[in-house]
């Protein structure tokens, strides 16, 4: 059988040398295996990943003494090699493990070079056995075609001799494969001629040998073997509970008590008191502070049951005691545990490490005192520890044992208007009534299940917040839950369930938060503030943190700020110790993405805070931040009209959209494709993969009528939960003819969405002035722009202007001087330099 021409005469010895030279240098000899190899549970894994492990990873693994630490290492080892971390599967790990199983089944061990080839490149497309005796040593030749990872055809050659196998390297030369007596020499050309003449299928054999790659060099190709940055190893070791070699330490007291329960789990509160004299102090313009990191692990036997991380920032001015209080709270099932804490003073670099057996009791319906419930040996407590327990008694008493739970069952996904029935699930015997609130107003109460309510959301699409309160027989709220409606699949929401608004607190309170994450996103951290002072940073659930209050009963507020891995954030604020008649104070910052151009329409750089004046309802606002934003992630949705009238322009529109994606999208940006005619369809969800976006644009057909307003509302709903710069690019050539929503309803939803609309009217006649007028108003009210063009071929020019605007904006942030109210607030941005013009949203809803 003859191979394609690519395998034959065009492949020369020089070509083989070029292949070898193009690959990276061969890896150094592997060091001794890490000590983890002595653990039978890891010996097999180490053998499978021998080709993947870096020197830094080997050294780190060798330093891990406990099995649970090595298991955590393995999980992180695969995560950093995941080619698509946004998906639920780790494709590289799955393929590698399947190949390892295949290699084990075919060969004696994974040290067989053929097993290594299977791991690296997979099984070959075809195998040749070359038995051209006596001229040629017995060979096994593996032939590979082009793949997404290796975009060329190549072969691997294995020499079979004396019961063993070795990989042949092209740099050895063809003569090394000839089976002649020692000392006999032959030129390359002579070897080729001999094999072509004497061997069956000699032409194919020579072509395969000339296309051979070096297996050792192949192991260095990044498309086949991921090369993660070893920085992850340092970060992993930083998060262990072990002390660094030679670490300096300080003394601290660690005590536990059990103030309540959460369903079947016991509340375990760790009280860590650090002598003020032992702590380092951070000096900054904001004042002096004490700063600590805590890494914690809870083991049940040798298995890791819980892992947690906290960061504390304590303002020195508000701590008059001789000790510094650090409080951690976890929920554990009753039983025996090993609890390990590593406390690091970030200022002095010193550590305190605590490891002890902990017996967690079963706490009954009546909360036990620390003395009654604490099973630890009778170790004398210091005055600092006892005082801290007394201070936290108010916080512990303020949260009921959470046998009493209420959860609002999420309604079906999608945009909801009109009538909608929602149900709340209740657990616990104390809840005798459920009170529902919609957008802060009580609307309905039920005293028996099912605890459901039929909401009237109105005809117009609008964002709503629904709250359910579980109330006991004494009229006390013992449980609560909140959900947001019509916020889209990418909604990001943090809610403070404790403290309770307006309630008075003296010495301490509990901050309890819940976080709803967007699809396929990960939480980076949640910060807890008392007013604008950061107190604690939590990196995992449960998001509950006791707070010691300063000696003051004045009005104050607790703030929770949640951050995604990409830097986007959301916050919630609860006021405490307030008079009953006090209006809610606006805490959140209003952010305005603002474009500034000169008289010729060119973007202007170099402006600073004094150059801007922001007016809200005619009142000048004090700017907290002015920032030139060029690297903020962009989320853009193309909304393309595919009705019958677009039949002549659709092809050009598709091509222009593809160019826009190719030119604009960076790794941190995302785009979506939504098309509409009689109805709307999401062709491609938000992604930064150009091939998926191209696939969504391919094969569109123009047919049907135009449901313009319905489709625009759906696009805005889809993107409304996102943070950062968001834009909908609407392309249409006609009047709406099929929508359920009216224009004014679509406009109002657009004003509330915070998404900029760039409307493009295509081939609109003079008689269609009303269509143009409506598109212009949609763009103006959302801070976008409207364009009218005659042909789709002009879209590329329009897309370039949109890109320039999105990439060259200022972010202006201010805290509104207005208090309360739900009415629309008008916003105006003025530039203090002549000849410059600013464009932003004309207003917002608080």
Image (spheres, helix red, strand yellow):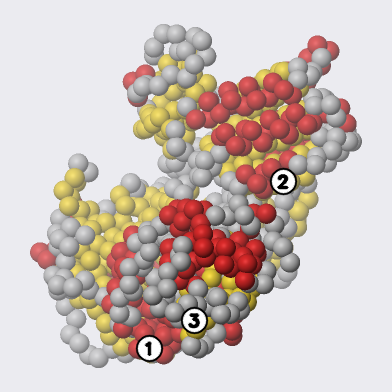
Kindly identify the residue that appears in the image at 16 percent across and 78 percent down.
382
Examine the rendering and report whether any part of residue 447 can be seen.
Answer: no
Q: Position of residue 347 (x, y in %)?
A: 18, 58
Q: Nearer the viewer, residue 622 or 658?
A: 658
Q: Residue at label 3? A: 165
Q: Is residue 15 above or below residue 845?
A: below
Kindly identify the residue that appears in the image at 20 percent across and 76 percent down.
253
Mark 2 or 3, nearer chain start: 3
Q: Position of residue 465 (x, y in %)?
A: 61, 50
Q: Nearer the viewer, residue 827 or 251?
A: 251
Residue 713, located in which quarter of the rendered image? Answer: top right
Tell me, yes or no, whether the two marked residues, 2 and 3, touch with CB atoms within 8 Å.
no
Kindly identify the residue that appears in the image at 21 percent across and 60 percent down.
346
Secondary structure found at label 1:
loop
Q: Residue at label 2? A: 695
Label number found at residue 39: 1
Q: Nearer the viewer, mark 3 or mark 1?
A: 3
Q: Position of residue 723 (x, y in %)?
A: 53, 43
Mark 1 or 2, nearer chain start: 1
Q: Is residue 468 left or right of residue 604?
A: right
Disc 1 crowd, CA 10 A, few/some/many (<14, 14-19, 20+): few
Q: Position of residue 110 (x, y in %)?
A: 48, 81
Residue 750, located in which quarter of the rendered image? Answer: top right
Mark 3 or 1, nearer chain start: 1
Secondary structure found at label 3:
strand
Examine the rendering and report whether any part of residue 676 can be seen.
Answer: yes
Q: Is residue 792 above or below residue 625?
A: above
Disc 3 crowd, CA 10 A, few/some/many (<14, 14-19, 20+): some
């Amino acid at each position: 059988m003859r191979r394609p021409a690519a395998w034959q005469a065009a492949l020369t010895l020089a070509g083989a040398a070029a292949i070898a030279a193009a690959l990276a240098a061969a890896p150094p000899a592997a060091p001794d295996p890490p000590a983890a190899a002595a653990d039978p549970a890891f010996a097999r894994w180490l053998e499978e990943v021998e080709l993947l492990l870096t020197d830094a990873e080997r050294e780190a693994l060798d330093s891990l003494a406990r099995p649970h630490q090595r298991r955590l290492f393995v999980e992180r080892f695969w995560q950093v090699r995941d080619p698509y971390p946004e998906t639920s599967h780790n494709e590289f790990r799955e393929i590698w493990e399947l190949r390892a199983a295949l290699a084990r089944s075919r060969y004696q061990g994974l040290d067989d070079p053929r097993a290594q080839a299977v791991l690296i490149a997979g099984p070959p497309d075809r195998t040749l056995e070359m038995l051209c005796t006596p001229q040629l040593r017995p060979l096994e030749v593996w032939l590979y075609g082009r793949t997404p990872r290796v975009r060329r055809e190549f072969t691997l050659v294995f020499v079979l001799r004396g019961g063993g196998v070795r990989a042949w390297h092209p740099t050895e030369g063809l003569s090394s494969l000839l089976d002649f007596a020692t000392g006999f020499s032959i030129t390359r050309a002579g070897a080729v001629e001999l094999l072509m003449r004497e061997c069956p299928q000699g032409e194919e054999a020579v072509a395969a040998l000339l296309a051979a790659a070096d297996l050792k060099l192949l192991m260095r190709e990044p498309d086949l073997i991921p090369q993660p940055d070893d920085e992850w190893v340092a970060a992993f070791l930083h998060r262990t509970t072990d002390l660094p070699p030679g670490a300096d330490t300080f003394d601290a007291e660690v005590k536990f008590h059990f103030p309540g329960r959460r369903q079947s789990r016991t509340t375990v509160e760790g009280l860590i008191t650090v002598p003020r004299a032992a702590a380092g102090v951070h000096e900054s313009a904001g004042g002096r502070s004490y700063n600590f990191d805590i890494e914690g692990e809870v083991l049940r036997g040798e298995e890791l049951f819980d892992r947690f991380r906290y960061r504390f920032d304590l303002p020195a001015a508000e701590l008059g005691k001789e000790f510094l209080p650090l409080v951690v709270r976890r929920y554990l099932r009753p039983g025996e545990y090993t609890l390990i804490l590593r406390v690091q003073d970030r200022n002095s670099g010193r550590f305190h490490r605590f490891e002890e057996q902990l017996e967690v009791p079963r706490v009954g319906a009546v909360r036990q005192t620390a003395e009654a419930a604490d099973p630890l040996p009778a170790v004398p407590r210091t005055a600092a520890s006892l005082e801290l327990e007394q201070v936290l008694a108010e916080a512990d008493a303020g949260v009921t044992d959470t046998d009493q739970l209420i959860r609002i069952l999420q309604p079906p996904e999608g945009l909801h208007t009109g009538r909608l029935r929602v149900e709340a699930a209740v657990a616990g015997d104390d809840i005798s009534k459920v009170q529902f609130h919609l957008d802060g107003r009580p609307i309905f109460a039920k005293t028996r299940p099912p605890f459901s309510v039929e909401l009237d959301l109105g005809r117009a699409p609008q964002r709503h917040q629904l709250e359910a309160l579980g109330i006991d027989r004494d009229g006390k709220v013992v449980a609560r839950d909140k959900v947001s409606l019509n916020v889209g699949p990418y909604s990001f929401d943090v809610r403070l369930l404790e403290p309770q608004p307006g309630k008075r607190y003296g010495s301490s309170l509990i901050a309890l938060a819940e976080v709803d994450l967007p699809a396929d996103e990960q939480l980076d951290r949640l910060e807890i503030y008392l007013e604008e002072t950061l107190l604690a940073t939590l990196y995992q659930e449960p998001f509950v943190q006791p707070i010691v209050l300063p000696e003051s009963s004045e009005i104050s507020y607790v703030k929770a700020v949640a951050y995604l891995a990409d830097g986007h954030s959301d916050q919630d604020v609860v006021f405490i110790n307030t008079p009953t008649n006090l209006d809610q104070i606006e805490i959140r910052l209003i952010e305005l993405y603002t474009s500034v151009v000169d008289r010729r329409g060119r973007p202007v750089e170099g402006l600073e805070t004094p150059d801007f004046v922001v007016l809200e309802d005619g009142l000048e606002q004090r700017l907290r931040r002015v920032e030139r934003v060029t690297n903020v992630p962009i989320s853009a949705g193309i909304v393309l009209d595919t009705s019958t009238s677009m039949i002549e322009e659709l092809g050009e529109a598709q091509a222009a959209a593809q160019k826009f994606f190719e030119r604009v999208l960076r790794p941190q940006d995302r785009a979506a494709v939504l098309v509409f005619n009689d109805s709307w369809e999401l062709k491609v969800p938000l992604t930064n993969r150009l091939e998926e976006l191209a696939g969504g644009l391919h094969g569109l057909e123009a047919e049907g009528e135009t449901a313009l307003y319905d489709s625009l509302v759906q696009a805005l709903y889809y993107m409304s939960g996102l943070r950062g710069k968001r834009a909908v690019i609407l392309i249409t050539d006609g009047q709406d003819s099929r929508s359920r929503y009216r224009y004014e309803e679509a406009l109002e939803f657009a004003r509330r969405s915070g998404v900029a609309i760039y409307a493009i009217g295509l081939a609109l006649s003079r008689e269609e002035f009303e269509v143009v007028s409506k598109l212009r108003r949609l763009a103006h009210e959302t801070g976008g722009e409207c364009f009218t063009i005659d042909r789709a071929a002009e879209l590329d020019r329009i897309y370039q202007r949109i890109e320039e605007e999105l990439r060259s904006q200022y972010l202006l942030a201010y805290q509104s001087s207005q208090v309360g109210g739900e009415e629309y607030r008008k916003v105006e941005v003025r530039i203090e330099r002549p000849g410059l013009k600013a464009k932003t949203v004309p207003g917002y809803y608080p």
